[in-house]
Image (spheres, rainbow, N blue to C red):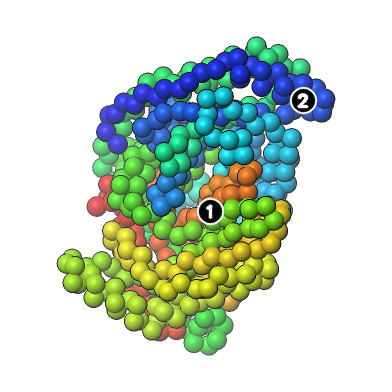
């Protein structure tokens, strides 16, 4: 992202906002407790990522989501409420997420500017965040290999640990859907608040966002070292161990991840890295999540674990089966040949069927009716192509929070876990060199209208200061070849390495 400038404009109706605040205070007094107040208005913004980069501080939680196929961009920052479940907490994190949503959205007041063309039912409070891959952390360490290689004192190293659940309600959020751009400001109102003072606080926030946005990317850095994270055994030996267990019938598939630590001569700029990813992979969902401690998780994922929308008593669901990979050709004919080889590969189609079966079985266990299958096709990205089958289903339920129960059932699918799931995940947790954190786990958003999307956090990594940790995984099945699986992960690493300026 070069030095750029963007100006945002908004229509302001302070009287309308003041009237809504008065109503919210009255409700807080009647309830005898704080009330979440949400106000939406039309907004114009040419570059939401630039707005997020220029209007946030290091200590503020941040969230960015760009889903081109849905014509949707979310840019959000600050927090009026959040829930975090640490790694050593054995609480049911999905249940904690539901309780959090119920607590804060139940009595919320949703207001809108009179000039906003959206009807009242189209505005909503959004909750954004992520779950970790495992329900509790494992194998966490402090990037020791990289530290030893560069003689850094261990006590100065960043921790890679992320909560097993982090959800927050943003203080402000920009939603760009199709051709409509809406700014939503959230604020907790106390029974003793004065309307004029609340109005002033909200107006100050709006004025801050309305000022010209100027952002200058830091000086270009140079990557000084790339080190593979090693555990008890090197990655190829772990793959061979997995293949032995597969042949002995312990499991049919396991997805094993590699991790690289990347060190630069100065701090990485997460917004610049994400900007490169979104330009290089326009077919993917670009995402960024930073919970205000200087640690950023970002990536560009081609895979949706769950997209949902409530229609009264009916619930629509979608989940992507994405497994089986091959590189891209240098010519059109070579690319077509590689794609056909993938479609005709017995090994890759078997791996893909594991994923389809795991998703369908888990959706049906929740009472969902699976729509007739569409044909498996190819999802072509700039450096890799995958076997892809979109799975859609419907379920009769009036409580849209069932989406979190479904998400809990789906994660991890066989695309990022294995089959049978429990045995494969146990092997991964024991033998992978480092804790995945949010890698390959659900990240996304949902709102009070019963709609949301969670992607699989792949093609992703963490950034903290001058260090980054990136991940890539490969699905191991009976006839996998160790060298081929290592080559597949190398191809997948390329996306983040290029965005980090390492290639």
Q: Please, is residue 124 above or below residue 113 in the view? A: below
User: Badge 2: few (under 14), some or many (20 or more) residues near its Cα, within 10 Å?
Assistant: many
Pick the residue in front: 453 or 260: 453
Residue 360 % position (x, y): 57, 72
Q: Quadrant of residue 103?
A: top right
**Regarding mark 2 in the picture, which secondary structure is present there?**
helix
Label ID, residue 399: none
Instruction: State the image coordinates of residue 390 (x, y, percent, origin top left).
Output: 47, 66
Up/down of 466 relative to 375, above or below: above
* Direction from residue 360 to residue 333 in the image, left or right: left
Residue found at the far top of this picture: 196
Q: Locate residue 396 relative to residue 47 in the image: left or right.
A: right
Residue 362 seen in render: no
Q: Kindly identify which residue carries mark 2.
A: 28
* Residue 307 appears anywhere in the view: yes
Per the image, label 1 sits on a secondary structure element best described as strand
Earlier in the chain: of badge 1 and badge 2, it is 2
Quick one: which residue is furthest to the bottom in this view? 248
* Residue identifier under label 1: 454
- Residue 177, placed above or below residue 229: above
| Relative image position of residue 177 (x, y in whole percent) | 46, 41
Identify the residue at horizontal 59%, vertical 53% (top origin). Answer: 309
* Residue 104 in the image: above or below residue 163: above
What's the CA distance linking mark 1 and mark 2? 33 Å
Question: Horizontally, is 500 left or right of 241 in the view?
Answer: left
Residue drawn at 57 percent across, 15 percent down:
14
Q: Quadrant of residue 221?
A: top left
Horizontal and vertical percent position of residue 73: 44, 42
């Amino acid at each position: 992202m070069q030095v750029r400038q963007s100006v945002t404009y908004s229509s302001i109706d302070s009287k309308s906002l003041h009237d809504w605040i008065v109503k919210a205070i009255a409700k807080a007094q009647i309830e005898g407790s704080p009330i979440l107040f949400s106000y939406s208005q039309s907004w114009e913004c040419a570059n939401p990522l630039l707005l997020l980069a220029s209007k946030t501080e290091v200590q503020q939680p941040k969230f960015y989501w760009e889903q081109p196929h849905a014509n949707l961009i979310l840019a959000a920052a600050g927090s009026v409420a959040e829930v975090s479940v640490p790694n050593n907490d054995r609480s049911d994190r999905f249940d904690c997420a539901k309780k959090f949503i119920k607590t804060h959205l139940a009595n919320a007041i949703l207001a809108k500017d009179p000039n906003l063309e959206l009807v009242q039912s189209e505005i909503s409070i959004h909750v954004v965040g992520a779950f970790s891959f495992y329900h509790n952390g494992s194998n966490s360490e402090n990037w020791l290999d990289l530290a030893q290689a560069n003689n850094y004192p261990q006590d100065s190293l960043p921790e890679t640990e992320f909560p097993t659940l982090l959800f927050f309600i943003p203080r402000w959020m920009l939603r760009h859907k199709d051709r409509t751009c809406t700014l939503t400001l959230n604020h907790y109102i106390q029974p003793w608040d004065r309307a004029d003072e609340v109005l002033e606080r909200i107006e100050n926030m709006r004025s801050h966002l309305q000022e010209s946005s100027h952002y200058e990317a830091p000086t270009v850095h140079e990557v000084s070292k790339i080190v593979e994270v090693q555990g008890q055994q090197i990655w190829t030996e772990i793959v061979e161990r997995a293949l032995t267990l597969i042949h002995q019938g312990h499991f049919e598939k396991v997805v094993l991840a590699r991790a690289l630590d990347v060190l630069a001569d100065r701090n990485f700029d997460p917004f610049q890295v994400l900007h490169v990813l979104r330009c290089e992979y326009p077919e993917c969902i670009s995402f960024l999540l930073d919970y205000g401690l200087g640690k950023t998780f970002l990536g560009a994922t081609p895979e949706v674990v769950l997209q949902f929308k409530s229609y009264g008593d009916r619930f629509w669901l979608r989940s992507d089966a994405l497994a089986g990979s091959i590189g891209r050709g240098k010519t059109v004919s070579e690319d077509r040949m590689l794609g056909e080889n993938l479609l005709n590969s017995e090994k890759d189609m078997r791996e893909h069927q594991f994923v389809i079966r795991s998703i369908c079985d888990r959706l049906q266990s929740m009472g969902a009716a699976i729509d007739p299958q569409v044909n498996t096709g190819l999802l072509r990205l700039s450096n890799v192509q995958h076997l892809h089958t979109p799975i859609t289903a419907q379920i009769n339920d009036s409580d849209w929070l069932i989406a979190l129960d479904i998400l809990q059932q789906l994660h991890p699918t066989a695309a990022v876990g294995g089959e049978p799931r429990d045995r494969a995940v146990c092997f991964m947790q024991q033998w992978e060199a480092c804790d995945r954190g949010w890698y390959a786990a659900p990240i996304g958003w949902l709102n009070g209208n019963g709609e949301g999307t969670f992607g699989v956090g792949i093609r992703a990594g963490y950034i903290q200061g001058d260090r980054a940790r990136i991940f890539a995984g490969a699905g191991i099945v009976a006839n996998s070849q160790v060298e081929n699986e290592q080559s597949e992960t190398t191809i997948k690493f390329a996306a983040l390495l290029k965005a980090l300026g390492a290639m």
